[in-house]
Amino acid sequence: MDKRISLLAATGLAALSLGAAAPALAAEPVFPLGGPSALVLQPAPDTGASKERSLRYELAYVGPGNSFPGEFTVTVDLTKAAAVASVRLDPAKPRPNCTTSATAIVCKQQGLSVGTGGNGNSFDLLVSAAEDAKNGASGEIAVTGRVAGAGVTPVTTKLTVGGPDLYLGELKPKAEVTAGEQQDLPLAFANRGTLPARSVALELDTSAGLEPAETYDNCRRQDHGGMGATTVCLVEGEFLPGESYQLAPDSPLHLKTTERAYQDRLRYGVVPDPAPVKDASEGKPATGKKLKLVKASAAVPVTDSNLDARDARHAEDTDLNPRDNERTFEFTAKGARADFEAVTASPSGKVGDTVVAELGFRNKGPAVISHLRSGESVARTDIVMPAGVQVTDVPRNCRAVSADGSDRAEQLGAPRYFCDGGMFADVSGAYTGRFSMKIEKAVADAKGSVTVGEPVAGGTKPLAFDPVGGNSKAVFVVEVKGGTSPSPSGSASASPSASASASPSASVSPSASAFASAAGGTGGNLASTGSSVGPIALGALGAVAVGGALYVGVRRRSGGHA
């Protein structure tokens, strides 16, 4: 479940153009101008003003060091757009040092720095179809830049009056599912625009417990590890205004529920005229089958109910109304189970030494547990420190409490800590935090503990989805060399080193992000050392919520919500 970023998150996706590199002296840096390569405009209505669309250009810093001096001049050439469009600076996002005329907009900027972001390196335009421009008429906006001692790559945006407007039909699958079952996905859409789409991309963004049952040669799948996967199918053809289309009878789609299911999400969408890409079957065995679309026998219903505007991305470059290009559906798996095992350690040292221990839990599966819908933690780790040690550094996701679990103001030196496990726990992922502690004295038979469970006042209780209670608690000891210390005993989950290795999923989970220590030291990290791409954004976590990464092969946080 992005900042996975979906295809719909960047329909211009590959449509985003940074321009071709302009010739420059070998020693000169080259700064790219970014902007969409195409934009479709609503034709002017018979009465009233034309609908404006946003258009952003951005000057990216890619030079040496952290900044580049000098005055950058960016020129927006409107001479080839005048016959088809009206273009103006967006008054809601003003920029200083810009001048406008009938044929150009010129903006100046002093210097360019890494991380300037926002309006610092970008400028926003509003574009609408000219009153007398005909459906299908086209023009272009050419953007160039210059600065002494460097090159600036240009970018050109093709403007078209009219375009496709793909409206996606609503699916109504069963929301409560069980592992192993399949449901039909009868994807269908209508073109309610003024021009045909020459091709379409169908996207299925699935969280970890869901996956398409079929494989086709014109579909590509990008796996996001525990976060799920994105499948994009590119279908060539001419999809005419006023017509509806559905999957061909010989190329159905079904959604399969896997044993990894818990709380899952499907995001599905359609994008007109995606950027050209290499053969989708490249790099994988051919099946001999292609996903196909045919005209529907009946029009797709045109109700606007249940559209999720938050999840509509940027199909806006090639679709007249991107708000209805994408929908989402959420599932709950009946009887989902996951075994959360306490992860402990046995550091050793002499009195006066400072030792570290990775403490937390791991998900042994089979389900991937996420609370991305609610934003609540999947679990709490309750860590009791053994006598004789003084905690000197703790992860930021942990808070100190008194021995009875009551609140405590001072974060260091506490006898007990409650640690937030984050909103997501992948199978085979270990979610641990690094504690630093000074050995102050040897205490006979001093034992602490690590317990994973559902947060409650004063501690934890057993997790409803965890059928294995015996390993949810483990002994935590610190061996004092030359002193008296106990041998580890208790749960088999005790591990001599919770941080021995890191596995590919460390970047997947929101709960696996690296945290600075609460005490300001270098220690406290909450890390997934378990079993890949993280919200990606897709995201922002809406994106994360469903796999979240843009399938760049066909067409781009932290984004939709889970």
Image: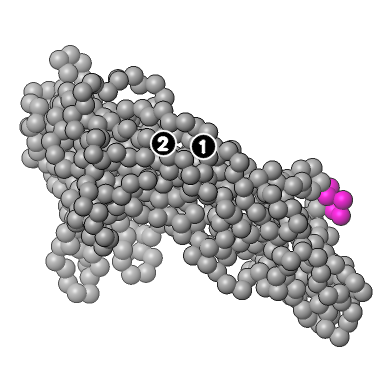
One can see residue 248 in this view? yes
Residue matched to label 2: 183
User: Predominant secondary structure in magenta?
Assistant: loop
Residue 458 location (% of width, % of height) = 81, 46
In the foreground, 479 or 94: 479
Q: Residue at x 32, y 40 (%)?
A: 253
Name the quadrant containing residue 300. top left
Residue 403 falls inside the magenta stretch: yes
Q: Is residue 509 left or right of residue 9?
A: right
Pointers 1 and 2 in contact (C-beta within 8 Å): yes
Amino acid at the residue labelled 2: Gln
The amino acid type, in three-letter code, at marker 1 is Val
Which image quarter: residue 499? bottom right
Q: Earlier in the sequence, mark 1 or mark 2?
A: 1
Q: Residues within 10 Å of mark 2 (few under 14, many from 20)?
A: some
Q: Read off the residue under disc 1.
A: 177
Q: Percent position (x, y) of residue 395?
A: 67, 60
**Image position of 312 (left or right of 393):** left
Q: Quadrant of residue 375?
A: top right
The percent coordinates of residue 410 (x first, y second) are 80, 56
Q: Is residue 451 left or right of residue 510?
A: right
Under circle 1, the secondary element is: strand
Q: Residue furthest bottom?
A: 482
Residues in magenta, as a range: 402-406
